[in-house]
Image (spheres, coloured by chain):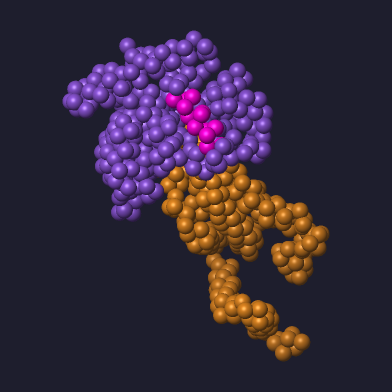
Chain colours: A orange, B purple
């Protein structure tokens, strides 16, 4: 229906975005009936999400005309934004931005670099930026989950941790149950992605590749490749963030330093 | 001479050396209580001589020196100084919120003093590695925070931090000391509150500490469990382990302690023989 009205592809895109936004707003108003007021929040989030992704589209258009190495800048900017977003969600934790930034950078950066070098990710801007961004976004979520869970575990086990310290345990030993739990909890989404791949969902990348005319079989295999890379970088990110954060909650004299 | 005995006996009491060491411990305690009585009698006459007597006869295990702790500009512990003699049980008493537990947490450096320090057997505790300090100055907390697993695994935790696994005999001896014979393989989830607290005592003793800090160890327990734990405390004290016990229960302090230190609003009000400190307290209240 929209296709006949909007022959121009970009105009069509905006029209499609408008229709989905109306749908989302209907859901927002439906929630109101139950006394949950999210209309304004939904509206702002919708507007913001659209503006951000359109801006990225513009940048990609510009970059396609430039040299390949500009994609490195794009991905670095994404890592910084991911660090900031992660840190906002875990405000209580001391130094959460630094921890988030380094974990996401090392966790996703190393996977992107090695995979691009090995030829698993194509070095072309149209490939490395979207695939890289997926890896970074998932590393961000894993990092936020890991830090959030770690903090919750520490707050609810202050007695056990201090008992261990009082018995002469090193700080790392005293929080190792919290580290283990937050590590495995943060990997649940990435693991579920792998398990349910194809059964519950056909992820966006594969859908996109099929929509733009790639062979569905290759699209399927490549989707697996991406999910597997996401799992690897998530695991790495979580390992790094939990080992960085566990040092930050202790003073040099091995005292638990969280506000009580 | 006494100092030498005191130290070796502490080790003897906590390990499974058996009857010989206990016999000497008993004699040592007789001598100790005689000397302490003598000191307290002298104290009434001449404080200076009494102080000299204490320094000469009974080695000082812990010295709190001007301990102060402030959190967000609120002073919780305010310039507190006192000595803990080797082998004694010192009660820290006072109303809730007086800073008793906060003071205790400074003694094994679980919290950092804003100013002041603690001497452990004459040495500033900042010169001792924190982990070694906490092995020597053990702690039992208000609530029994046992680790998941068996009772034996809990008892092994402290020694394992020093790279040592306790033998089955050591575990049995520790369990005997706290009245939990045959509990080694028991899962901690099946313990009652009082049993779990006694596991915490045994777990702290497994480190063979010179001093044991007790933070209201019976306040979360019912009457029977409380008396069981008091029996354990008496036994540990009789084995020559120096104890510092926080309690808000004056009767308990009278039952267990030799001396008492009274806190109010973070300040040390008075310290001395339990009968004197607590009599003044009851007279005032």
User: Per the image, is B128 magenta?
Assistant: no
Residue B41 appears in the picture as rendered = yes
Residue plotted at (33% across, 14% down) = B2
The relative height of residue A23 versus residue A223 in the rendered view (above or below) is: below
User: Per the image, is B232 magenta?
Assistant: yes
Residue plotted at (47% across, 43% down) = A247
The residue lying furthest to the top in this view is B20
Q: Percent x, y for residue B27?
A: 41, 13
Q: Quadrant of residue A49?
A: bottom right
Q: Quadrant of residue B16?
A: top right
Question: In front here: B76 or B227?
Answer: B227
The relative height of residue A244 versus residue B34 in the rendered view (above or below) is: below
Quarter the N terminus of chain B occupies: top left
Question: In front here: A180 or A194?
Answer: A180
Q: Percent x, y for residue A91?
A: 47, 59
Q: Percent x, y for residue A92?
A: 47, 57
The residue lying furthest to the front in this view is B283
Question: In front here: B20 or A109?
Answer: B20
Give the magenta part as a residue range: B225-237
As drawn, is B132 to the left or to the right of A158? left
Q: Percent x, y for residue B51?
A: 22, 25
Residue A109 appears in the picture as rendered = no
The relative height of residue A188 versus residue B106 in the rendered view (above or below) is: below
How would you classify the magenta stretch by its main secondary structure? helix
The residue lying furthest to the bottom in this view is A5
Question: In front here: B154 or A138?
Answer: B154
Numbered marks: total: 0
Residue plotted at (71% across, 64% down) = A205
């Amino acid at each position: 229906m929209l296709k006949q009205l909007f022959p121009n592809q970009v105009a069509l895109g905006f029209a499609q975005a408008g229709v989905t936004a109306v749908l989302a707003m209907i859901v927002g108003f439906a929630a109101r009936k139950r006394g949950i007021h999210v209309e304004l929040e939904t509206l702002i989030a919708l507007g913001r999400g659209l503006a951000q992704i359109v801006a990225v589209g513009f940048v990609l258009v510009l970059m396609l005309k430039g040299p390949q190495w500009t994609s490195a800048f794009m991905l670095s900017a994404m890592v910084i934004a991911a660090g900031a977003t992660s840190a906002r969600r875990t405000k209580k934790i001391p130094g959460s931005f630094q921890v988030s930034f380094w974990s996401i950078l090392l966790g996703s950066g190393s996977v992107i670099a090695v995979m691009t070098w090995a030829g698993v990710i194509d070095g072309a801007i149209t490939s490395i930026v979207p695939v890289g961004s997926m890896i970074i976004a998932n590393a961000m979520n894993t990092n936020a989950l890991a830090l959030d869970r770690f903090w919750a575990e520490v707050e609810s086990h202050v007695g056990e941790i201090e008992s261990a310290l009082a018995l002469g345990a090193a700080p790392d030993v005293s929080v190792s149950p919290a580290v283990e739990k937050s590590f495995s909890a943060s990997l649940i989404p990435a693991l579920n992605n792998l398990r349910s791949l194809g059964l519950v969902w056909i992820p966006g990348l594969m859908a996109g590749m099929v929509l733009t005319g790639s062979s569905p079989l290759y699209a399927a295999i490549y989707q697996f490749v991406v999910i597997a890379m996401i799992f690897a970088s998530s695991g790495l990110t979580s390992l790094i963030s939990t080992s960085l954060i566990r040092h930050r909650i202790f003073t040099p004299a091995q005292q638990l330093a969280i506000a009580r | 001479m006494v100092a030498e005995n005191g130290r070796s006996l502490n080790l003897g009491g906590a390990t499974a050396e058996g009857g010989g060491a206990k016999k000497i411990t008993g004699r040592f305690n007789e001598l100790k209580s005689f000397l302490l009585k003598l000191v307290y009698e002298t104290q009434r006459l001449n404080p200076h001589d009494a102080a000299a007597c204490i320094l000469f006869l009974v080695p000082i295990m812990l010295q709190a020196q001007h301990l102060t702790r402030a959190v967000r500009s609120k002073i919780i512990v305010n310039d507190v100084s006192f000595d803990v003699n080797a082998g004694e049980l010192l009660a820290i008493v006072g109303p809730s919120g007086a800073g008793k537990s906060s003071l205790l947490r400074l003694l094994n450096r679980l919290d950092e003093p804003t100013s002041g320090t603690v001497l452990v057997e004459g040495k500033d505790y900042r010169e001792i590695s924190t982990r070694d300090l906490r092995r020597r100055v053990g702690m039992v907390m208000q609530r029994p925070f046992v680790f998941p697993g068996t009772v034996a695994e809990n008892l092994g935790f402290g020694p394992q931090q020093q790279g040592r696994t306790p033998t089955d005999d050591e575990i049995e001896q520790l369990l005997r000391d706290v009245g939990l014979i045959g509990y080694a393989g028991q899962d901690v989830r099946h313990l009652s509150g009082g049993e779990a607290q006694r596991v915490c005592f045994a777990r702290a003793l497994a480190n063979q500490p010179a001093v044991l800090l007790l933070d209201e160890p019976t306040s979360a327990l019912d009457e029977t469990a409380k008396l069981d734990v008091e029996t354990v405390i008496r036994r540990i004290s009789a084995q020559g382990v120096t104890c510092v016990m926080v309690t808000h229960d004056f009767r308990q302090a009278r039952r267990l302690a030799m001396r008492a230190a009274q806190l109010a609003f973070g300040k040390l009000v008075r310290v001395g023989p339990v009968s004197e400190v607590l009599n003044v307290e009851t007279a005032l209240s």
